[in-house]
Image: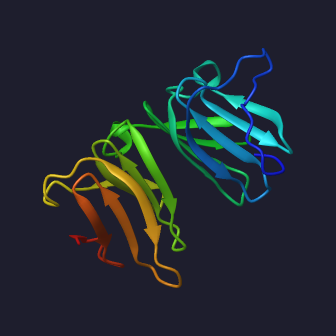
Amino acid sequence: VLDGKVSQILLPDGQTVSSVLSLAEGPDGDVWVGTYAEGVLRFRQQQLVARYNRQNGLPANEVRAILPLADGSSWIGTAGGLVLLKDDQMQQFHVADGLAGEFITALSLQKTGLLWVGTGSGLSVRQQGKFRTLSIVELDKSDYIFDFYQIPDSDEIWFSADRGIARVEPGTLKLQLV
C-alpha cells in the first residue's frame, strides 16, 4: 500500500506474489511479508532488501507468522518449524526442541519476555531459553492456535483456538477456556 493504493508485490525476476499469509512491521519500519510459497520478503521503503526461503535456511516456504524484535532479530513461523533469524543466521526449532508442532500459526512476545508460539498441534511457550508445550487438549479438544492478545498494562495473555478463546493465568501458566 502506497499513497492509499494497493499494488502487487513484484519480485526481482518480475513474478508476482499471489498469496500473502502474514505481515509485520519491524521497529525499524521494515515491512516483513510471509508468503505461501516464496518464504519471507523484507521491504525497506518499498524496496525488497532481503528474501528468506528454503534455499537459504527456512525449513519451509509457507510462512504464517513473523515477529520482528527491537534487537534486529526476528522469529519466523513456517509450516515446517520455527526460526530465529539474527544477523542473517537462522536457528531452527522443532518438536524435538519442545514445540507442540511444526506448523507454526502465531507468535507473540509478552512484556515479561515469554515467547508464545501457536501451532497446528497446540501451544508452546519459550521461557529462559527453553520451549515447553502447554496442553490445550482439555480445552474442549483444541489443537490449532490462531492468534494472541496481551491485555495492556498486564501480564495476562489470551489466545484464539479452534474451540474458542482462552486465557493464560499470569505466573502459573494455567489455561482457561472462556
Q: Residue furthest front?
A: 5
* Residue positioned 83% across, 43% down in the render: 44
Taking the image as drawn, is residue 88 in sight?
Answer: no
Horizontally, is 103 left or right of 178 in the view?
right
Residue nearest the observer in this picture, 87 or 117: 117
Taking the image as drawn, is residue 102 in sight?
Answer: yes
Q: Is residue 125 above or below residue 92?
A: below
Q: Residue furthest bottom?
A: 153
* Residue positioned 52% across, 28% down in the render: 36
Which of the 4 image quarters holds residue 39?
Answer: top right
Which of the 4 image quarters holds residue 177?
Answer: bottom left
Q: Is residue 134 above or below residue 82?
A: below
Q: Looking at the image, what colour scheme do you see?
A: rainbow
Residue 25 placement (x, y as % from top left): 69, 53
Q: Is residue 110 above or below residue 76?
A: below
Residue 43 placement (x, y as % from top left): 78, 40
Which of the 4 image quarters holds residue 40?
Answer: top right
Horizontally, is 63 left or right of 10 in the view?
left
Q: Quadrant of the C terminus?
A: bottom left
* Residue positioned 77% across, 49% down in the render: 30
Residue nearest the observer in this picture, 1 or 26: 1
Residue 53 placement (x, y as % from top left): 61, 25
